[in-house]
Image (cartoon, rainbow, N blue to C red):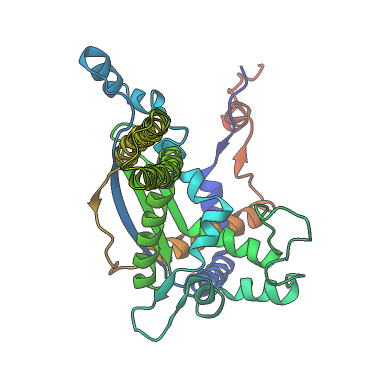
Amino acid sequence: MQALPRISLSAAWAVVKHHKRFFIVSQLVFIAIGLVIGFSIPRTYKAEIKLAPENSGPSLSGSLGSISSMLGMNLGNQLSEDAINPELYPDVKSSPDFLLGLCQIKVQTKDGQVKTDYKTYLTRHTKSTWWDALRLKLFPPKDSGVAVAPAGQSDKTIRLSMSDYMLLQGIDGAIGCGVDKKTGVITITAIDQDPLVAAILVDSVSARLQDFITDYRTSKARNDLQHFQKCYADADSAYEASARRYAAFADAHQDISLESYRVESDNLENEMQLAFNIRSQYATQVEMAKAKVLERTPVYTVLQKPYVPVKHDAPRRSFILLFWIVLGFVLSFLWKARKAERPVIIHNPQAERADAAPSASLTPEE
């Protein structure tokens, strides 16, 4: 079996000692690069909010619920009648229509100097690294603004220019949404260069996500409510009309005792009673639909309210500096180790030990 190659520490130290001036200069260069990059990245702040949604699925009891909890499985979400369970919330927040809605929220910086919508704030009042500015200057987007849909195209189709597409990608990267499968707690985060904007953004994302899920879960119940309300309005109009016809006929034939008039009066009264019964049934359906809307409306418990962060989340300049120092040393060492007299990496250690061992002394022939 072939032995693995190893590194000769003595040879490596010899390379560093022989080219120490080169290593000092290269380290100073890479330290300067690390400092430039670290101080070129704008500081960002992260705000966070935690929600505990109502579990709409059937509850698990007994040993099955205990076993699923121990295994980290949330079977309640799988048994839920909703197509959108909490595990799909991250996909909801990344949808283009959801991100477009965030562009219109009103934000304000901590110093109070900027008060505008979020899109204008991102495009005009945020800092960027010098390499991003250089890239945009050398390769500017070919179009600007939202493209207009052609005539005859459905309004449900979303068309974006390249600049707006990049803007939405940046917003999507700035907000995060995670769901704990064991507890079902939803954690929403937002990152921005201003701490107050980050807090406003995470609060808006939370509110809009709750509104989206509420609209989805109550859409069928609200449609049923609108249907029954329309039917009730039609039934009420029909009852009022039949009541007016019956009252007018009864007032006009009070002193007439003909059988034909009594039959007509009974028919009108029965028609009025039937319209009243239909109106009463639809009134009951309206009240039941209202109760269904309230039942389907989810309830979110805020476990952690958003607060304005005090300390910045990134960049970690010490980590960046350490990374460039290590990278500079490795590259410098590899560059000089190629031309070293003694090999630093020994591919066959056993052969080297055999060559280095002193030869066995032979007894001279007499």
Q: Residue furthest left?
A: 62
Which quadrant of the rendered structure holds the C terminus? top right
Left or right: where 311 falls relative to 149: left
Position of residue 8 relative to residue 23, above or below, is above
x and y percentages locating residue 90 in the rendered image: 46, 45
Left or right: where 144 falls relative to 225: right
Q: Residue at x 38, y 78 (%)?
A: 109
User: Viewer-proximal residue, 89 or 258?
Assistant: 258
User: Viewer-proximal residue, 118 or 34?
Assistant: 118
Q: Quadrant of residue 245?
A: top left
Q: Residue furthest bottom?
A: 113
Q: Is residue 153 visible?
A: yes
x and y percentages locating residue 20 in the rendered image: 54, 65
x and y percentages locating residue 324 in the rendered image: 52, 62
Q: Residue at x 31, y 35 (%)?
A: 284
Q: Quadrant of residue 152?
A: bottom right
User: Viewer-proximal residue, 254 or 233?
Assistant: 254
Left or right: where 35 falls relative to 354: left
Q: Residue at x 37, y 28 (%)?
A: 77
Which quadrant of the rendered structure holds the N terminus? top right
Q: Is residue 216 visible?
A: no
Q: Residue furthest top?
A: 63
Q: How many marks?
A: 0
User: Viewer-proximal residue, 332 or 118?
Assistant: 118
Q: Residue at x 35, y 84 (%)?
A: 112
Position of residue 92 relative to residue 288, above or below, is below
x and y percentages locating residue 280 in the rendered image: 32, 36
Left or right: where 87 falls relative to 36: left
